[in-house]
Amino acid sequence: VGPLYKQIWHPEHPSLSFVGLPHSVVPFPLFEMQGRTIAEMALKGWGEVGEEERVREAQNDYEGMGPNHRRVEDTHYLGDLQWDYTREIGVMGGIWGEEEERRNMVNEEIYKRAGMERKKGKIGGDDGYRRMDFWRDWEKHEWGIEKKGKRGKPRPRV
């Protein structure tokens, strides 16, 4: 699908939007932010962002092969760029605040930790990283790994 404005909207017909195209992401928080932003933009309108700007940015994103500047097939690959992208669309929709920032940061830390665990494994080897259970405390901005039903110590911020 492309070219799309912010990987969500058809640039010439912004009432046509797509949720869930970015991949290699923590899906539910990102897709929730996309949905909330779509709703806000539908309610409040586009303001100073005109069709010409949407078309230009969508085309630049597509021709630049997405945010990672890889192959055109990777236009919707975000990986580590998902955190800034989530923040950007939340700000755009006027729905980004302290709580969203806290959650985004905790999710990023857990994502990076799970990625480190995954990289320790060998091809065809134990996939124990898939069985890691994390706990989170959004208010305190803490998280940890739960082992055998017991809550582990909070992890230091990354």
Image: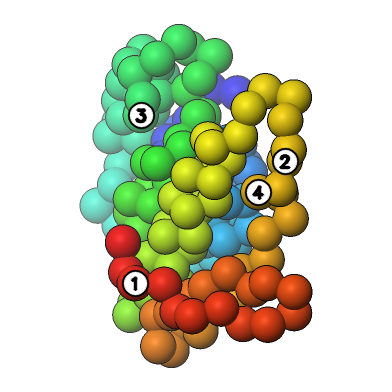
Q: CA distance from mark 4 to mark 2?
A: 5 Å
Q: Is tag 3's residue or tag 4's residue first in the polypeptide sequence?
A: 3
Q: Mark 1 vs mark 2: which is more N-terminal?
A: 2
Residues under numbered marks 4 and 2 in contact, where contact means CB atoms less than 8 Å apart: yes
The residue indicated by pointer 2 is: 127
Q: CA distance from mark 1 to mark 4?
A: 19 Å
Q: Quadrant of the C terminus?
A: bottom left
Q: Which mark is residue 129?
A: 4
Residue type highlighted by circle 1: Pro
* Residue under pointer 3: 67
Is 24 in front, or is 49?
24
- In percent of the image, x 49 and y 80: which residue is there? 153
Front residue (pair 45, 64) = 64
Q: Is residue 143 above or below residue 6?
A: below
Marks 3 and 4, how far apart at CA: 28 Å
Give the number of the mark in front: 1 or 3. Answer: 1
Mark carried by residue 156: 1
Q: How many marks?
A: 4
Real-space CA distance between mark 1 and mark 3, rounded to the nearest whole angstrom: 29 Å
